[in-house]
Image (cartoon, coloured by chain):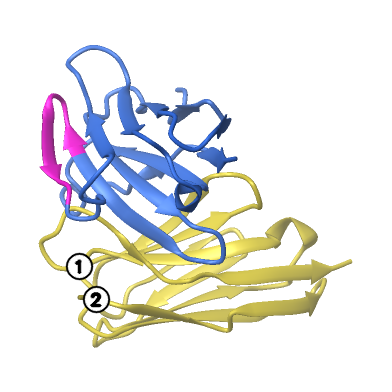
């Protein structure tokens, strides 16, 4: 059973470009979470999605960031007009039930390391 | 908002030694999760604790949640170089469907 797959593993963008990060959850998981790990900082929650719905986006920056989890295909975290401060590791996690229900933990992917030149 | 404080921030031990990492919450923990992260990689799920006084073990790693559900410890017995990495505790902040993480403990095991 394949784990959470994220791609690309590394992404380099110039300031002002767009970054698209992809996440395919584990088979049978319909709940996806995105986290950001800034250099020298801890892991911070960004957004929680179910298929076709954003459930909680309380951790998302108000501008330039968006996320989706379409009926078919991977979840996408999109960052428009990137700036140097967006450089970080972005992690995706998935679970078969909502976090906290059914005693099912979140399983994480290996992350995408985003570097802004 | 819930905050998790981990101690120590970093730990260097000789192979074969036992060690303990602590995670303290500012609020009651509804679920406490331990993960391990190797540099440049993702998080590997270790254990989940939900009940006060609960204790779980896997191989040489034991995790406990205190009765008041505000503190957890992770104990490694007879450490090995393969145990090296960053250990993170995560918790559910009440009804929110997300995890709040501590800042992590960097473990180095010297051969």
User: Which residues lie in the magenta part?
Assistant: A49-57
Question: Vertical placement of B30 versus B48: above or below?
Answer: below
| Quadrant in which residue A91 is drawn | top left
Element under label 2? loop
Q: Colour of chain A?
A: blue
Sequence-wise first label, 2 or 1 = 2
- For disc 2, the chain is B
Q: Main secondary structure of the magenta part?
A: strand
Residue tagged by mark 1? B93
The answer to if A52 sits in the magenta stretch is yes
Q: Position of residue A97 (x, y in %)?
A: 19, 39
Which of the pair A117/B96 is nearer the observer?
A117
Q: Are marks 2 and 1 in contact (CB under 8 Å)?
A: yes
For label 1, the crowd category at 10 Å Cα-Cα, with few meaning under 14, some 14 to 19 and many 20 or more, is some
Foreground residue among B12 and B39: B39
In the rendered image, is residue B17 in sight? no
Chain whose colour in the figure is yellow: B
Of residue A85 and residue B7, the one placed in the foreground of this image is A85
Label 2, label 1: how many angstroms apart (C-alpha)?
6 Å
Q: Nearer the viewer, residue A24 or B82?
A: A24
- Residue, disc 2: B2
Q: Position of residue B35 (x, y in %)?
A: 48, 58
Give the residue at x 17% y 54%: A58
């Amino acid at each position: 059973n394949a784990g959470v797959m994220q791609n690309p593993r590394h992404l380099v963008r110039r300031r002002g470009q767009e970054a698209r990060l992809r996440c395919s959850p584990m088979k049978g998981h319909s709940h996806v979470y995105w986290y950001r790990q800034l250099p020298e900082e801890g892991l911070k929650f960004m957004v929680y999605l179910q298929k076709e719905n954003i459930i909680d986006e309380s951790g998302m920056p108000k501008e330039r960031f968006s996320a989706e989890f379409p009926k078919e295909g991977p979840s996408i975290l999109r960052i428009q007009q990137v700036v140097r401060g967006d450089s970080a590791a972005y992690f995706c996690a998935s679970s078969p039930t909502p976090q906290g229900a059914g005693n099912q933990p979140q399983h994480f992917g290996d992350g995408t390391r985003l570097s802004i030149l | 908002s819930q905050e998790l404080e981990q101690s120590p921030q970093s730990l260097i031990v000789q192979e074969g030694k036992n060690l303990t990492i602590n995670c303290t919450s500012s609020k009651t923990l509804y679920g406490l999760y331990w993960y391990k992260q190797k540099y440049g990689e993702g998080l590997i799920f270790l254990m989940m604790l939900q009940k006060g006084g609960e204790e779980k073990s896997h191989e040489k790693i034991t995790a406990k949640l205190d009765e008041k559900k505000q503190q957890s410890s992770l104990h490694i017995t007879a450490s090995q170089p393969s145990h090296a990495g960053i250990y993170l505790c995560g918790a559910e902040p009440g009804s929110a469907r997300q995890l709040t993480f501590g800042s992590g403990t960097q473990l180095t095991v010297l051969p």
